[in-house]
Amino acid sequence: MRTSLKQLLRIDRRLKRLERALIRMRLEEIVPTLSNPKRMIWTNLLGGIARGLGIAVGFTILGAILMLLLREIAANNIPVIGDFIAQIIRIVETKLH
């Protein structure tokens, strides 16, 4: 079986392209984490806690802003919407107390 120079050059180009792709994937940073189950669990646990706290804080802030806006609309007596929002605010406040 004789391999021509063209085939060798083509294989060389493919190997270089594969090498660049592997370098871009930064596997040398990922492999130690994947091979150590304790480290992987710890990393995922911390990531999950951070995401959960972020969602909770973000939802709380958005909910507070929404309640403030609804109160202002109800306080300014905007027709139709104001009455509806006032009922919603009363329901929410009774559930909170």
Image (cartoon, grey):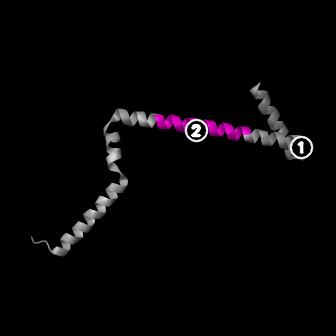
Left or right of 76? Residue 97 is left
Quadrant of res 83: top right
Residue 47 lies in the magenta stretch: yes
Compare marks 2 and 1 and give the one earlier in the sequence: 2
Q: Is residue 6 above or below residue 51?
A: below
Residue 1: percent from the left, percent from the top? 9, 70
Under mark 1, the amino acid is Asn
> 10 Å neighbourhood of mark 1: few (<14), some, or many (≥20)?
few
Secondary structure mainly formed by the magenta segment: helix
In the orientation shown, which residue stands out farthest toward the left?
A: 1
> Counting other residues with Cα less than 10 Å from the Cα at mark 2, is it few (<14), some (14-19), or many (20 or more)?
few
Q: Which quadrant is home to the C terminus?
A: top right
Give the residue number, with chain letter if any, for mark 2: 54
Reply above or below: 90 against 31: above
Which residue is disc 1 drawn over? 76
Q: CA distance from mark 2 to mark 1?
A: 33 Å
Residue type at numbered disc 2: Gly
**What residue span does the magenta drawing correspond to?**
46-64
Give the camera-side residue of 23 and 81. 23
Residue drawn where x is 23% and y is 70% of the image: 10
